[in-house]
Amino acid sequence: MNKLTVLSLALATCCYSGLSAQETNHFVVKANKLGAEIQPTMYGHFFEDINYGADGGLYAELVKNRSFEFPNRLQGWKTFGKVSVQEDGPFDKNPHYVRLSSPGHAHKRTGLENEGFFGIGLKANEKYRFSVWAKGNAQKILVELIDPYSMGETQVLASGKIEINSSEWKKYELVLTSPVTLEEGHLRIFLASEGNVDLEHVSLFPVDTWKGRENGLRKDLVQALADTKPGVFRFPGGCIVEGTEIEDRYQWKNSVGPVENRPLNSNRWEYTFQHRYYPDYHQTYGMGFYELFLLSEDMGAEPLPIVNVGLACQYQNNDPKAHVPVDQLDSYIQDALDLIEFANGDESTQWGKLRAEMGHPAPFNLKFIGVGNEQWGPEYPERLKYFVDAIRKAYPDMKIIGSSGPNSEGKDFDYLWPEMKKLKVDLVDEHFYRPEDWFLKSGNRYDNYDRKGPKVFAGEYACHGKGKKWNHFHASLLEAAFLTGVERNADVVYMATYAPLLAHVKGWQWRPDLIWFDNLRSVRSCSWHVQNLYGHNKGTQVVPLLMDGKAVSGQADQNGLFASAVWDEPTKTYIVKVVNVSDKAQPVSIEFDGLKKKKLAGQATCITLHSDDPDAENTLDNPDMIVPQESQVTVNGETMQTEVGAQTFAVYRIAVQ
């Protein structure tokens, strides 16, 4: 589609078509009746290490199995010559390392080569920081970035030597510049002397990480998260909080402190789906809770950590013995309390001191904590009670989030909501991966919720098209329609996060996902654009909205129109969102009633998201196939006449002069 066609489409979806008044859908914004406050946390992100979301994804480390702690100690590595694995290394939680010994002949070689995560992505003229902990007297290693599949005279792209000059363990660094862009490079290391060299924690990072941090994050992926202006950032999951077995659960204390001594953890997404099996998918904890708190701060989002409630994954365990007995929860409760201290404690506390030593003396100002993930049955609230009591006693202002289980309705959902009310949690985490018809029928889901009970955190949601488990436009359009009901009920819903967040195109277990990437590129899905439009047009207060004289109800029988209206105090702007899920254009008039002395600007900004093909999606090769288009609409006094195109999400911003 050329630019002229795109512009014509944008104008067609925003401008008044001149259809008769009898055919026009009439909206009235009750401009002088500002309603519920919209929470700053309303739209945000949910992060889980699924689809290579951490190692191989957001975490910028390029070396796989850098500390030789995978169950297969040399997985990800090719070795040649005399290489042996030792287990008395300098880091007690990561004791394994490799010893390179002379090959025994001048024309033979000893060394090892790392394949990275589906290769090592290199960019032309970019710098890469190699580091290694090593020991050896007067020894040398040769470090190379290579193209293992090169048809040129050499595989070597960049190289440098490091002199290992101590019999004690010491960290060494070398910066190499890649002359080319390559998606599947490798790292190769040669022993370049006659003796023995021991190597541990072999690492390679781009120098240009997010904010230039060592042990940093991948810049383009963080930018895609930050660009949506998220108000909340939930981590580290998801099912990895539970673990297939309780020993596999995510343990935050193992994810902080010196990165070289953070132990490996298994990842349930390695083996959960036999038809998409990845035997090299583990968690190094390199991007741990400190880095995730720091990322929340960078994005201006409230951090929302989730802790284990003493239950392993209930999908994978029917035996009650798989879970922690109620009378043995003390260490789990203490982990939750210590986490709050790590985030908020001053330097006189044990965990606040560690945070300061890691580089952040100021507290992270944690306000929310979730306890448990997709738990269900009486075993969940009976354990949750002890966490609630302990957290309330130690930190009475902390907001506690419970769960309504894995389903959006049904037996478990109906049981858990009253239990959450009894325990007086502050928010309840609802999950819904549902088909198109569910999203079409659920625009009024929160219209009749209890206004006095716990608030809602729509913690994991995504529209899954029947037979279309990819990020096609139509699913995103229905998500936009559903979110109008979330927004209209901002007195009930305080948070909403799409899930999952990230997926490597060569290593995914679950789809659809918000952002896709390979080793060099990333693409923002249509669902990402929906989140972005809501994040940038959230507003500060809900405004009542009528359609043809009745309150907008969020039902598709309103000519296929879903809508919400908000007021944004900082910009003195009314924002009206209209989603047309029908197959025909809808003429619309938007009247602002009760302006009194306020006057609207003569032009409104109209932003639309549309695709002629409902099955189309953005891809790495065509990332801008479906993106929002902006135009202007004339406002006549207190009324705006426009038309919302078929299968279109439209956002109107009308400023007050």
Image: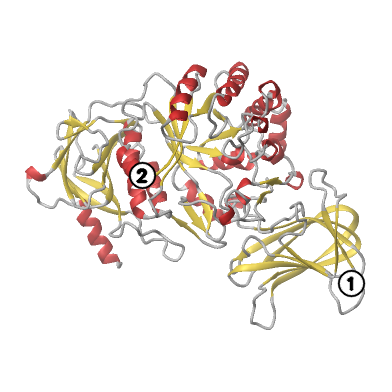
Taking 253 as reference, is 123 above or below it?
A: below
- Where residue 128 sits, quadrant-wise, is bottom right
Taking 488 as reference, is 478 above or below it?
A: below
Which comes sooner in the sequence, label 1 or label 2?
Answer: 1
Kind of residue sitting beneath label 2: Glu
The tag on residue 103 is: 1
Q: What colour scheme has been applied to the protein in the rendered image?
A: secondary structure
Question: Is residue 237 something that shows in the picture?
Answer: no
Name the residue rendered at 56%, 52% in the picture: 51
Name the residue rendered at 79%, 47% in the picture: 94
- Image quadrant containing the C terminus: top left
Residue count near mark 2 (Cα–Cα under 10 Å), binned few <14, some 14–19, many ≥20: many
Residue count near mark 1 (Cα–Cα under 10 Å), binned few <14, some 14–19, many ≥20: some
Q: Which residue is mark 2?
A: 479
Q: Nearer the viewer, residue 371 or 218?
A: 371
Q: Nearer the viewer, residue 586 or 581?
A: 581
Secondary structure found at label 1: loop
Q: Is residue 513 left or right of residue 611?
A: right
Instruction: Name the spot of residue 558 as percent of width and height, x first.
Output: 20, 39
Q: Are marks 1 and 2 in contact (CB under 8 Å)?
A: no
